[in-house]
Amino acid sequence: MEMVSENVAIMLYYRRDCKYSVYSLVSTLESKVKDVDVYIADGKTFFKVFSNVVGKYRWVIVGFSFMTTMLPSLLNFFRNVFRFKRSNTIFIAGGSHPSGDPVGTLDLGFDYVFVGEAEHSIVDFVNSLVKGGDVFKVKGIVYRDESGEYVFTGKPKLVELDGYPAFPYWRRMFNPIEISRGCPFRCTYCQVPFLHGFYMRHRSIDNILHYVRVFWGKGLRDLRFISPNSLAYGTPYGSKPSPEILDELLSKLRTIANSYGGRVFYGTFPSEVRPDFVNEDTAMILKKHVSNKKVIIGAQSGSDRMLKFLNRGHTVEEVLNAVEILSKYGFQVDVDFIFGLPGETGEDIEETIKVMEKIVKMGGRIHTHTFLPLPGSPLENAPPGKIPLKIKKFVMKICGKGMAYGDWLKQEKLAETIDELRKKHVIKIEMKNKIRGWKTSKEHININTYVISTMESHV
């Protein structure tokens, strides 16, 4: 029998659409856990890497981080992977989908699901294995006990971003710097605040500048940032802009960028902005300091009734005002819209088309999306998004003129697939209340009740 020479190895599945999560896990594990080897493998190399490490270590943790949008394309891969389970392998899952559907994820074949922010949980979990501790005392995981009951060990601690590297630069792996986490705006279609909390936490300016110098010092050029709302940087709760702190951050970034020949992209993917945070001050700050010529803002609907229903916290007037101000400062403005929203009426659709027409006339472009019922969001039980015919005709017309773009048609099919997986009980969001120790938030309960009553009133 081959001798087991090491204690614990961690093998992370890599795919381009989970790249940022994988890099974050690598930086967390290699900076916080001692005496653990971390491997990364994609779909082509997975089984080769797995076979090489499984005989060398006492424990091999195989980790997957994935979104609901990835699930349909991963199901067959999971089935093949779990055929290779061994007595010393532990399969774990985390990310937005496992957090929103822990029972369905466990029933796919995983041993543990990490819920919400996993930095503290994964470190505690691995250290428990390394030191022979009790993994069931680790906060933030869902597992199935010997009787078959699903158990949640309790909420994990929220993360202070300064305590973790922005990226695993020692491996020459780089991603946009996450500067803020959490969101106070509880939009009903979104998983973010229910995963990361209802107030924003920010990486400090000094910490950001440290990793900025590392990034540009490696000869890289274009620097981007991750934030639910980049214009909220520095504000204590993320509920209104703080122009002074924003200007301090961006002016210091610009100074360093000039010395390295770098470029700063801010207010565009993946750090878009809310329209109600756009004013003369914030637009002027962007104009002074950023390299991008485009800014993306989220509108999601052209109906004030729907914006209220979605809990967006802004009005149609604020969307149009943001487009006007940013255009005045020379930015190309792209505006997010979500089609096929639950509870949408014919009047809401007409209003949305009128607003999109106004935005196009102002020189803006429409960034198209179709509603996806995402596990972990308050609208997780809503029907799949179906693009109304009037919307489809209008958007097709402006797409031909270069005034609209996006994956709205693919997402319509994806929404149907997600719904099919719910009906087949591959996604088991209805089972969350069966988890011992799990508490459904009041926001989810109240919003789901409102969604059902609103949709029924328009049948």
Image: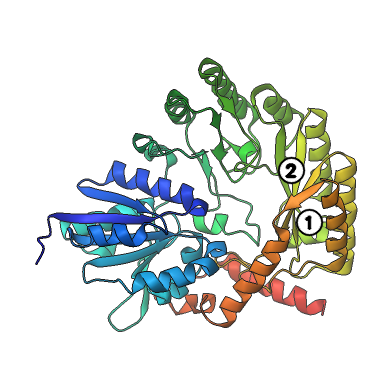
Quadrant where the N terminus sits is bottom left
**Element type where label 2 sits in the image:** helix
In-front residue for pair 67/401: 401
Distance, label 1 to label 2, CA atoms, is: 12 Å
In the image, is 169 to the left or to the right of 405?
A: left
Q: Which mark is residue 31?
A: none
Quadrant where the C terminus sits is bottom right
Q: Quadrant for residue 61, please give it.
A: bottom left
Q: Is residue 431 visible?
A: yes
Q: Residue at x 71, y 76 (%)?
A: 452
In the image, is 320 to the left or to the right of 433?
A: right
Location of mark 1 (residue): 301
In-front residue for pair 369/113: 369
**Element type where label 1 sits in the image:** loop
Q: Which mark is residue 275?
A: 2
In-front residue for pair 62/340: 62
Residue 173 in percent (x, y) is at: 41, 39
How packed is label 2: few (under 14 Cα within 10 Å), some, or many (20 or more)? many
